[in-house]
Image: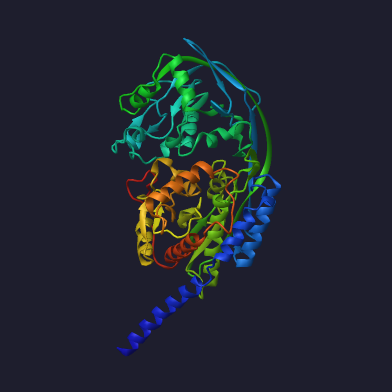
């Protein structure tokens, strides 16, 4: 009996010392160093296809070597991602003819548009416009805006987000919380599938999850796509956004009430209709093909190396762009240099542990997240690991430098059993799990966990966010609102070590090391919840 007790204590002590040694590796100096370097002006905003990319990739590969990670792509830390950069030159004034006259929309102010093709020029001549409501075909929600109308070779105007958002009806989709069907990516994808010639989404700040200057920034700027034959064979030749005021103006000239139609479109009996309006536009495309890089290192498991847990944090940002307050470099300190620092600190902890993890751990930093998650989509389609044996993806993105948090906000809560595992670990450190305070933003579908989700891999996107320890929830929400308005995707997203408090990032790094450590060392196979749109049997 004494022998069994001693053996039990030795096992407990061994597990404890294994974690203690790893946890001692965490420090804020490493976090600050990575953020400072990756958000420095010398990296010019980390845009793909630039000298900033080359410098970023070189730094990240060196850091992975220093930490002791093995290259994930054979003998290389980088994976070539073939891409195309397209600049669409649009007219300064877009004229739309209606039965009551002509509406003139100004580029940047009223509308933005681009052509996701390598064809040139794109000429749209007197094409009918159809109001499609939400432009959703969702069998899992018994909703199909397309069933009563043929939109082939038409321009469609659609609302952003889901019907539940505008009605607060929890029986419609997921109520206030955006589903994938509410995302701009889905709207454009569905327009392509249904044969539309173009798709314009009406922008509203809260419904979209970001202000107009984020959506409208696509005008006359390089947009990235994965290089494929499809780029020369697109059916939907125009993607774009209208401001709310531009939409109201257009609908009024068509003899329609936009606000009333928004409510009608949220009802199941809504039928799309032609607006008695026609669009003329000429777009000139310039494109170039090049290769960007995904970066990844791996620690191979000692017992089940084919089973993998993936940590991810994209490296790219917006490069050099529109001058705001005398600054044109979009440094991306919070988005996403800080998340890369988080990932590196966790990688260092796994390497500092006295024992190898039983499953493999892969640390991925994809390219082109800001352009549409293209790097992570490419990785999932051309992975050096078996995606079907991937246990989970733990992603991080957009960090607030506010100090410690009582909460751990799970964006996309309720999709899998990963939530329960996180709650167990969070409780141990005196924090609590909560849902995203702004689920209408659709952040669960806006970062690199999405390609893993679509491939059937349960994913976690969580961080301290909505309840700063000293400030409380109300003040924290005010700072969150200020961040999205004044810092997100702007040159002001910079790192100031004297101002910015990394203690929260440090605590999150430790937490998600513990969380991941359980996934790689225990016999845990996360399961999908049946109400998730990504549900598959595992």
Measured as percent of width and height from the top left, residue 339 is found at 53, 55
Identify whether 35 is placed above or below 132: below
- Residue 420 image-quadrant placement: bottom left
Image side of residue 342 versus residue 433, left or right: right
Measured as percent of width and height from the top left, residue 537 is found at 36, 51
Residue at 39% from the left image edge and 78% from the top image edge:
12
Q: Nearer the viewer, residue 346 or 434?
A: 434
Image side of residue 4 versus residue 71, left or right: left
Q: Residue furthest right?
A: 51
Residue 500 appears in the rendering: yes
Identify whether 105 is placed above or below 405: above
Measured as percent of width and height from the top left, residue 243 is found at 49, 28
Quadrant (top left, top right, bottom left, bottom right) of the N terminus: bottom left
Q: Nearer the viewer, residue 497 or 20?
A: 497
- Residue 119 image-quadrant placement: top right
- Residue 105 image-quadrant placement: top right
Measured as percent of width and height from the top left, residue 445 is found at 45, 44
Q: Residue furthest top?
A: 100
Quadrant (top left, top right, bottom left, bottom right) of the C terminus: bottom left
Total marks shown come to 0
Q: Nearer the viewer, residue 500 or 347?
A: 500
Image side of residue 16 versus residue 301, left or right: left
Q: Residue furthest bottom?
A: 2
Residue at 34% from the left image edge and 31% from the top image edge:
143
Residue 299 appears in the rendering: no
The scheme the figure's colours follow is rainbow
């Amino acid at each position: 009996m004494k022998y069994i007790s001693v053996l039990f204590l030795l096992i407990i002590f061994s597990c404890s010392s294994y974690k203690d040694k790893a946890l001692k590796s965490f420090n804020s100096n490493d976090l600050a160093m990575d953020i400072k370097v990756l958000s420095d002006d010398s990296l010019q905003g980390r845009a793909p296809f630039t000298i900033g990319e080359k410098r970023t990739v070189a730094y990240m590969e060196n850091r992975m070597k220093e930490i002791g990670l093995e290259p994930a792509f054979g003998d290389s830390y980088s994976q070539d991602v073939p891409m195309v950069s397209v600049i669409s030159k649009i007219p300064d004034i877009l004229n739309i003819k209606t039965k009551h006259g002509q509406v003139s929309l100004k580029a940047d102010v009223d509308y933005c548009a681009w052509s996701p093709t390598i064809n040139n020029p794109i000429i749209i001549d007197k094409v009918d416009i159809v109001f499609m409501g939400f432009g959703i075909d969702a069998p899992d929600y018994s909703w199909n805006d397309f069933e009563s109308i043929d939109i082939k070779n038409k321009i469609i105007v659609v609302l952003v987000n889901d019907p539940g958002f505008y009605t607060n009806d929890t029986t419609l989709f997921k109520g206030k919380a955006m589903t994938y069907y509410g995302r701009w990516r889905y709207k454009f994808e569905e327009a392509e599938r249904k044969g539309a010639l173009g798709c314009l989404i009406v922008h509203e700040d809260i419904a979209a999850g970001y202000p107009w200057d984020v959506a409208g920034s696509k005008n006359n700027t390089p947009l990235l796509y994965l290089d494929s034959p499809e780029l020369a064979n697109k059916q939907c030749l125009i993607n774009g956004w209208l401001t709310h005021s531009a939409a109201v103006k257009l609908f009024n000239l068509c003899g329609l009430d936009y606000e009333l139609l928004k409510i009608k479109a949220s009802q199941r009996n809504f039928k799309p209709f032609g607006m008695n309006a026609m669009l003329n536009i000429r777009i000139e495309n310039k494109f170039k093909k090049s290769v960007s890089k995904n970066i990844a290192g791996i620690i191979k498991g000692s017992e089940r190396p084919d089973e993998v847990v993936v940590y991810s944090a994209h490296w790219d940002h917006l490069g050099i762009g529109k001058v705001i307050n005398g600054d044109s470099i979009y440094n991306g300190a919070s988005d996403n240099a800080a998340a890369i620092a988080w990932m590196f600190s966790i990688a260092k902890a796994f390497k500092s542990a006295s024992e190898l993890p039983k499953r493999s751990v892969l640390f991925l930093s994809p390219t082109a997240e800001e352009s549409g998650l293209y790097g992570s989509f490419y990785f999932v389609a051309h992975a050096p690991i078996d995606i079907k044996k991937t246990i989970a993806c733990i992603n991080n993105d957009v960090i607030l430098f506010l100090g410690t948090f009582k909460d751990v906000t799970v964006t996309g809560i309720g999709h899998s059993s990963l939530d329960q595992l996180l709650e167990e670990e969070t409780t141990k450190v005196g924090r609590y799990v909560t849902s995203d305070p702004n689920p209408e933003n659709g952040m669960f579908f806006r970062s690199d966990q999405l390609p893993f989700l679509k491939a059937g891999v349960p994913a976690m996107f969580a961080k301290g966010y909505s309840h700063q320890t000293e400030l409380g929830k109300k003040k924290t929400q005010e700072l969150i609102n200020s961040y999205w308005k004044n810092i997100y995707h702007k040159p002001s997203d910079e790192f100031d070590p004297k101002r910015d408090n990394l203690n929260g990032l440090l605590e999150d790094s430790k937490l998600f090391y513990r969380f991941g450590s359980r996934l790689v060392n225990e016999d845990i196979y996360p399961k999908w919840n049946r109400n998730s749109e990504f549900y598959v049997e595992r």
